[in-house]
């Protein structure tokens, strides 16, 4: 592969104000109030690997013991699992931000990295330094939970909507009633309440909604007539326990209703596909299950996440034939760099470049955005340089894709203001 071309592409990316197309980054006010920022509290997805190995998350494993003991617990777990991308993401962060030398944490260097994390993250302006100066982010399209706010100087909101599907559950319904100061006694009033909620957030600047229902049920949904869903919902409101097929029918109806809201209010519909947590039922997350919804709402812009991994090839063909689908690489480079390269190699052959979203951090700590971005740029440079060399993509076309995938497509899709390039 041509190193000069790869290098040129990397420099092009470093000079761009990137739009982070999917974020869970903690708000600055929350970050600054954290009781501890250290090697043993700053986790990303490797926390899930710790859970898979020990049955305990990092919070439990490292609580209330001295740092030396914490390291003694972590070291053998790294011996078992340090190969996975979720850990290598950590290594990139320690190397780039906290002075780790060499490729791994060890007895000789962990304490120095830990000290460096504590010192640097306590410096005034560190949060802005990471998100703005190092990452060069224009904005992060942030997954905002129900009834919460966000910091518009860093984030653009999309409203997370799983709770909308869980309104047969009384406590959930009461939360919504209280927030909007309405009564939800039937399906019509539920639909009105959901529309009001979305409209309220849209009024504050929200650009879309997000569903991650694939974590607990199939992505497959089909149209359910309002009268059928209303009869089922009435039974739930009366206190009856619905069976799963009955609840699914209500949920499916709401999913289609949410798409209607997106059409009316010009909101992007983001949906989690692929990649699960521990014990997740992978086939439920196959994006092909979404076909009935995508075809029913051709005017809605669907932003499908995580490369649908491992169904990335299917997702590529889906997007090729469904012009209302955008492909979002959120989370992917830290799941697997090789899977990311493969997906991108095929998609760039298949799908018009203006519907590819090249980066979504999908992490809680701002430091991990930077690590993820470095991994993303590296994969993109690999893929594009190879496309120029072997697959008849022009160099100009490759540079154009960099701008589209890391910035321009997001600005167009989410209706953001164009704020120039990084200095
Ligand atoms: Zn996410």
Image (tube, rainbow, N blue to C red):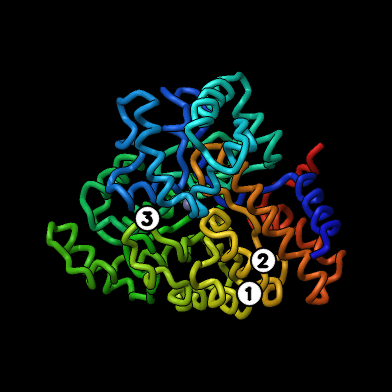
User: Mark 1 and mark 2 in contact (Cβ < 8 Å)?
Assistant: yes
Confirm or reject: label 3 Cβ below 8 Å from ligand 1: no
Q: Is residue 91 visible?
A: yes
Q: Is residue 188 visible?
A: no
Above or below, 361 against 72 in this view is below
Q: Which residue has dot 1 on it?
A: 323
Number of residues whose C-alpha sits closer than 10 Å to that of mark 1, classed few (under 14), some (14–19) or many (20 or more): some
Residue 142, percent from left and from top: 53, 45
Quarter holding the N terminus is bottom right
Number of residues whose C-alpha sits closer than 10 Å to that of mark 2, classed few (under 14), some (14–19) or many (20 or more): many
> Which residue is rendered at x = 60% and y = 31% of the image?
98
Label 3's element?
Answer: helix
Reading the chain from its start, which is encountered first: label 2 or label 1? 1
- State the image quarter where residue 147 is shown: top left
Picture disc at residue 355: 2
Q: Which residue has dot 3 on it?
A: 162
Reading the chain from its start, which is encountered first: label 2 or label 3? 3
Q: From mark 3 to mark 1, how far is it between C-alphas?
A: 25 Å
> Which residue is rendered at x = 71% and y = 33% of the image?
133
> Which residue is rendered at x = 53% and y = 77% of the image?
314
Q: From mark 2 to mark 3, how far is it between C-alphas?
A: 25 Å
- State the image quarter where residue 370 is shown: top right
Label 1's element?
Answer: loop
Residue 252, percent from left and from top: 35, 69
Reading the chain from its start, which is encountered first: label 3 or label 1? 3
């Amino acid at each position: 592969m041509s190193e000069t071309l790869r290098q040129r592409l990397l420099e092009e990316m470093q000079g761009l104000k990137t739009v982070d197309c999917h974020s869970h980054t903690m708000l600055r006010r929350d970050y600054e109030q954290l009781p501890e920022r250290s090697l043993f509290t700053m986790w990303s997805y490797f926390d899930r690997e710790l859970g898979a190995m020990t049955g305990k998350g990092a919070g439990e494993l490292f609580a209330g013991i001295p740092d030396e003991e914490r390291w003694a617990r972590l070291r053998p777990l790294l011996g078992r699992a340090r190969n996975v991308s979720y850990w290598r993401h950590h290594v990139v962060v320690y190397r780039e931000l906290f002075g780790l030398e060499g490729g791994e944490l060890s007895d000789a260097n962990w304490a120095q990295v830990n000290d460096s994390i504590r010192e640097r993250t306590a410096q005034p302006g560190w949060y802005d330094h990471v998100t703005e100066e190092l990452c060069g982010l224009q904005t992060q399209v942030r997954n905002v939970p129900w009834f919460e706010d966000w910091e518009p100087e860093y984030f653009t909101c999309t409203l997370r909507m799983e709770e909308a599907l869980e309104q047969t559950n009384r406590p959930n319904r009461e939360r919504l009633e209280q927030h909007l100061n309405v009564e939800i006694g039937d399906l019509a009033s539920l639909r009105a309440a959901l529309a009001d909620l979305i409209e309220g957030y849209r009024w504050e600047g929200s650009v879309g909604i997000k569903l991650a229902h694939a974590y607990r049920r199939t992505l497959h949904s089909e149209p359910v007539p309002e009268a059928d869903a209303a009869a089922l919902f009435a039974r739930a409101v009366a206190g009856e326990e619905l069976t799963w097929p009955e609840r699914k029918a209500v949920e499916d109806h709401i999913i289609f209703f949410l798409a209607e809201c997106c059409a009316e209010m010009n909101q992007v519909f983001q949906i989690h596909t692929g990649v699960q947590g521990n014990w997740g039922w992978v086939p439920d997350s196959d994006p092909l299950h979404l076909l009935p919804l995508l075809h029913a709402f051709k005017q809605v812009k669907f932003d499908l996440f995580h490369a649908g991994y491992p169904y990335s090839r299917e997702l590529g063909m889906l997007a090729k034939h469904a012009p209302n689908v955008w492909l979002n690489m959120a989370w992917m480079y830290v799941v697997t760099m090789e899977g990311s390269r493969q997906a991108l190699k095929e998609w760039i052959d298949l799908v018009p470049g203006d519907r590819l979203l090249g980066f979504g951090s999908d992490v809680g700590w701002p430091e991990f955005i930077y690590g993820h971005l470095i991994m993303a740029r590296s994969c993109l440079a690999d893929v594009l340089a190879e496309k120029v060399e072997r697959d008849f993509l022009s160099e100009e076309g490759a540079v154009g894709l960099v701008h589209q995938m890391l910035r321009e497509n997001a600005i167009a899709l989410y209706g953001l203001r164009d704020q120039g390039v990084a200095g």
